[in-house]
Image (cartoon, grey):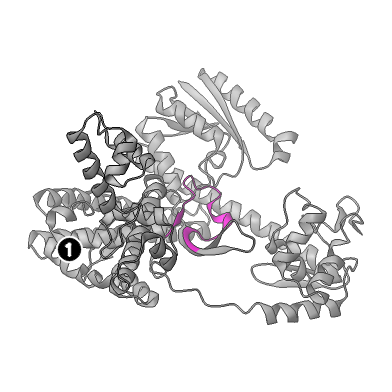
C-alpha cells in the first residue's frame, strides 16, 4: 500500500514545541510496521476548518495523480473539521481515486456506506469538539476580563508585558491621543483631514499611511480614559481604571457628543441591485452594493461610484476571485439581456441555456433521479442514527447535532427535488416555455423609462430576488423565479473595462453631437469654433463627432468643415486634370486656396498618384 502521511496542528506554537514531530514519528513507525510504502509526508500549520491549505492541496494532487492508496493521519480530525459541503468535496476526491483514510489501528473505506457514515460522524464530532474548546477558551477570557486583566493585542499607545501582567504607557506613541483630540475638538477638523495631518508626522505602528477609519477608532476607544471594555457574544464586560489615562472622561464624552452631531447615519442610497441577494460563485459568501469614491487630478475632486464586492474585508480572505465590479459594467448589460430575450427566441439563447424541449426533459429527469438517490441515502443515514441511540456508546447531544445537520441537508435536497419535478411537469405540459419567460420579463422593457432609482431597485428585486456573481468568468447569473414557482437562470456577461470605456466614449460623443445640433438649429450659420465655445467642446472634438455621426446641419463652412474640405479637393482635382504640371503658386491664384493647404490635401488624398 502506498501511503501519504498527513500531519497538522492549528498553531505555530504547537509546531515548534512538540505536535508535528510527534505525529510524524508515530505515523512513520505505524506505516513501517504495516509494510506500507511512504510516498511523502504532508504537513500544515492551520485550522482544520479550512480546505485550502498548502499541505492538504499538495496531498490531493498526489491522490488525483494516482500515487496514493491510503491517507494516514493520527486522528481523522487532523485531516478535517470541515463543514458539510467541504467535507463532501474532500470525500469525493478520495472516493473517486479509491483512496482510504487510515488511523493507527483502523482503516475507513469511503466506498462502504457504513464506513462513510462513521467517518461523517467523526467529522461532525471533531467540529463539535472544536466548538467546545472555543467555548471554554471564551469562558476563561470572560472571567479573566471580569477580574480587570487585559489580554491580546493592546493599543499602540500602551506596552503590555504578559509575563508580569504590567501595562505601561508607550511614551513614543502616547502623544497621538492629545494631538488628535486637539485637532478634532478645538480646531474642528474632520477625521480625513486629521489622518492627512498625521501622515505628515509619522506612519502607523505597522508602517502604513493613516486612514480616516483609524482616526475614528481612536476617538471612540474607551481605554484612553482608563476603561477596559470587551464585547463577547452574550455580554459586554466593562472595568474602569485599568489603563493609564491619556484623556479625561469629560473629553471622551465631548468627543462622542461631537461624533453623534457630525455623523448622522443615512439610509443606503437606492440602487438597481440592492434588493437582489448576490452570492459569490468562488466562495459562496454574499457580495453587495457599496458606494465608493474615485478621485480626480485636482485636490478634493472626487466622484461617486458603486461597486459590487464582498460585504466586509474579512469575509473574502479565502476567496479566490475577490469580486470588485463597477456597477456600470453590469447595468447596461442587464438592460440588453432583457431586450435580447424579449426580441425573439434566437437572441434569448444568448442568455438562457434552456430550450424547454425534449433534451431539457431528459436532463431534468437525470437530476430528479440523482436527487432522489441523495434523498434516500441521507434518509438512511438519519435512520441509522436510531441504532446508535439505542447502542448507547455515542453521546446523545452529539447524535442530536448530527440529526439536525442531516435534517437540514435533507430539507435542501427535498426543496431542490420538488422544484425539478415541478419544472419537469410544466415543460412536459408546455406550461413553461420561451413565451412565458418573455411575458414575465416584459415589465422590465420599461426599465430605462423608470428614471427613479427606487423604482428600478424594486423592479429588479421583484424579478430577480437572487443572483450569483462569477467574477472569474465575468458573469452575473440572475435567478428569475417565475409565477409557476420554478427558477430560470439568465446569464449576463459583465462588460470588460475596455468595453465599458469604449461604450461610455460613444455615449458621450452621441450626447455631445445631439447637444451641438440642437444649438445649431437655433443659431444657424455659425462657425465650428463658435459652436465649440457655445457647447464647451474643442472644435477638433466636434470634428470627430461629425465623422462618427454625420456633419452638423446649418454650420458655416470653415477650415475644419467636411463640406469645405470636399469642395477644396474637387477644385484641386480639376486644376490637376486641366494642367498636370501646374505649380503650387499658380494653383493658389486659380483656386484661392492657401498653398500649404493645397500641398497637405494633395498628400493626404494622394491626388498626384
Tell me what residue is drawn at x 80 percent, y 76 percent.
185
Tell me what residue is drawn at x 46 percent, y 46 percent.
321
259 up-or-down from 82: above or below: below
The x, y position of residue 501, in whole percent, is 40, 52
Residue at the spot of label 1: 342
Q: Is residue 39 left or right of residue 448?
A: right
182 up-or-down from 13: above or below: below
Q: Is residue 230 visible?
A: yes
- Nearest to the observer: residue 346 or residue 132: 346
Q: Secondary structure at mark 1?
A: helix
Q: Is residue 509 left or right of residue 367?
A: right
- Nearest to the observer: residue 538 or residue 429: 538
213 up-or-down from 8: above or below: below
Q: Is residue 386 visible?
A: no
Is 323 magenta? The answer is yes
Tell me what residue is drawn at x 38 percent, y 69 percent.
272
- Nearest to the observer: residue 563 or residue 133: 563
Answer few, some or many: residues within 10 Å of disc 1's Cα (few below 14, many 20 plus, some between 14 and 19).
Answer: many
Q: Is residue 135 left or right of residue 76?
A: right
Is 225 magenta? The answer is no
The x, y position of residue 444, in whole percent, is 25, 70
Which quarter of the picture shows residue 450?
bottom left
Chain part drawn in magenta: 305-327
The x, y position of residue 307, in whole percent, is 47, 60
Which quarter of the picture shows residue 427?
bottom left
Which quarter of the picture shows residue 517?
bottom left
- Nearest to the observer: residue 47 or residue 429: 429
Q: Residue furthest left?
A: 429
The x, y position of residue 251, in whole percent, is 84, 77
Tell me what residue is drawn at x 72 percent, y 68 percent.
191
Where, quadrant-wise, is the C terminus in this rendering?
A: top left
Amino acid at each position: 500500500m502506498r501511503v501519504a502521511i498527513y500531519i497538522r496542528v492549528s498553531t505555530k506554537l504547537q509546531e515548534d514545541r512538540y505536535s508535528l514531530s510527534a505525529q510524524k514519528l508515530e505515523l512513520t513507525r505505524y506505516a513501517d510496521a504495516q509494510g506500507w510504502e511512504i510516498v511523502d509526508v504532508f504537513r500544515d500549520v492551520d485550522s482544520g476548518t479550512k480546505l485550502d491549505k498548502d499541505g492538504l492541496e499538495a496531498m490531493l494532487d498526489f491522490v488525483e495523480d494516482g500515487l496514493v492508496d491510503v491517507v494516514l493521519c493520527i486522528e481523522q480530525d487532523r485531516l478535517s473539521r470541515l463543514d458539510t459541503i467541504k467535507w463532501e468535496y474532500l470525500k469525493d476526491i478520495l472516493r473517486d481515486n479509491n483512496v482510504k483514510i487510515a488511523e493507527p489501528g483502523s482503516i475507513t473505506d469511503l466506498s462502504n456506506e457504513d464506513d462513510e457514515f462513521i467517518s461523517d460522524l467523526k467529522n461532525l464530532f471533531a467540529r463539535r469538539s472544536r466548538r467546545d474548546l472555543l467555548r471554554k477558551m471564551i469562558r476563561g477570557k470572560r472571567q479573566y476580563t471580569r477580574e480587570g486583566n487585559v489580554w491580546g493585542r493592546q493599543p499602540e499607545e500602551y506596552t503590555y508585558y504578559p509575563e508580569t501582567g504590567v501595562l505601561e504607557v508607550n511614551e513614543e506613541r502616547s502623544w497621538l491621543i492629545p494631538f488628535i483630540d486637539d485637532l478634532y475638538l478645538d480646531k474642528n477638523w474632520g477625521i480625513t483631514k486629521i489622518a492627512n495631518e498625521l501622515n505628515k508626522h509619522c506612519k502607523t505602528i505597522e508602517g502604513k499611511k493613516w486612514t480616516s477609519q483609524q482616526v475614528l477608532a481612536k476617538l471612540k476607544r474607551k481605554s484612553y480614559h482608563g476603561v477596559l471594555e470587551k464585547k463577547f457574544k452574550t455580554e459586554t464586560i466593562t472595568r474602569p481604571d485599568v489603563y493609564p489615562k491619556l484623556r479625561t472622561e469629560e473629553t471622551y464624552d465631548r468627543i462622542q457628543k461631537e461624533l453623534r452631531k457630525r455623523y448622522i447615519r443615512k439610509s443606503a442610497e437606492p440602487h438597481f441591485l440592492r434588493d437582489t441577494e448576490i452570492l459569490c460563485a468562488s466562495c459562496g459568501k454574499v457580495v453587495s452594493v457599496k458606494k465608493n469614491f474615485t478621485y480626480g487630478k485636482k485636490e478634493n475632486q472626487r466622484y461617486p461610484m458603486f461597486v459590487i464586492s464582498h460585504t466586509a474585508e474579512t469575509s473574502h480572505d479565502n476567496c479566490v476571485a475577490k469580486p470588485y465590479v463597477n456597477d456600470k459594467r453590469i447595468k447596461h448589460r442587464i438592460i440588453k439581456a432583457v431586450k435580447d430575450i424579449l426580441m425573439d427566441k434566437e437572441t434569448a439563447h444568448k442568455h438562457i441555456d434552456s430550450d424547454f424541449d425534449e433534451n431539457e426533459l431528459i436532463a431534468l429527469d437525470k437530476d430528479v433521479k440523482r436527487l432522489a438517490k441523495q434523498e434516500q441515502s441521507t434518509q438512511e443515514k438519519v435512520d441509522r442514527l436510531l441504532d446508535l441511540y439505542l447502542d448507547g456508546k455515542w453521546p446523545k447531544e452529539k447524535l442530536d447535532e448530527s440529526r439536525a445537520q442531516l435534517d437540514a441537508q435533507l430539507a435542501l435536497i427535498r426543496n431542490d427535488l420538488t422544484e425539478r419535478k415541478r419544472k419537469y411537469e410544466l415543460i412536459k405540459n408546455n406550461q413553461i416555455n420561451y413565451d412565458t419567460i418573455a411575458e414575465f420579463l416584459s415589465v422590465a422593457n420599461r426599465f430605462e423609462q423608470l428614471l427613479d432609482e427606487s423604482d428600478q431597485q424594486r423592479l429588479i428585486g421583484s424579478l430577480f430576488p437572487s443572483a450569483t456573481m462569477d467574477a472569474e468568468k465575468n458573469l452575473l447569473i440572475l435567478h428569475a423565479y417565475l409565477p409557476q414557482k420554478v427558477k430560470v437562470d439568465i446569464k449576463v456577461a459583465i462588460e470588460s473595462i475596455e468595453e465599458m470605456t469604449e461604450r461610455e466614449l460613444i455615449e458621450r460623443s452621441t450626447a455631445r453631437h445631439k447637444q451641438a445640433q440642437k444649438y445649431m438649429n437655433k443659431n444657424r450659420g455659425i462657425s465650428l469654433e463658435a459652436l465649440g465655445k457655445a457647447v464647451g467642446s474643442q472644435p477638433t472634438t466636434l470634428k470627430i463627432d461629425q465623422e462618427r455621426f454625420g456633419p452638423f446641419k446649418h454650420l458655416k463652412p470653415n477650415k475644419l468643415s467636411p463640406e469645405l474640405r470636399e469642395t477644396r479637393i474637387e477644385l484641386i482635382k480639376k486644376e490637376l486634370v486641366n494642367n498636370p504640371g501646374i505649380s503650387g503658386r499658380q494653383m493658389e491664384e486659380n483656386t484661392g486656396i492657401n498653398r500649404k493647404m493645397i500641398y497637405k490635401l494633395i498628400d493626404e488624398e494622394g491626388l498626384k498618384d
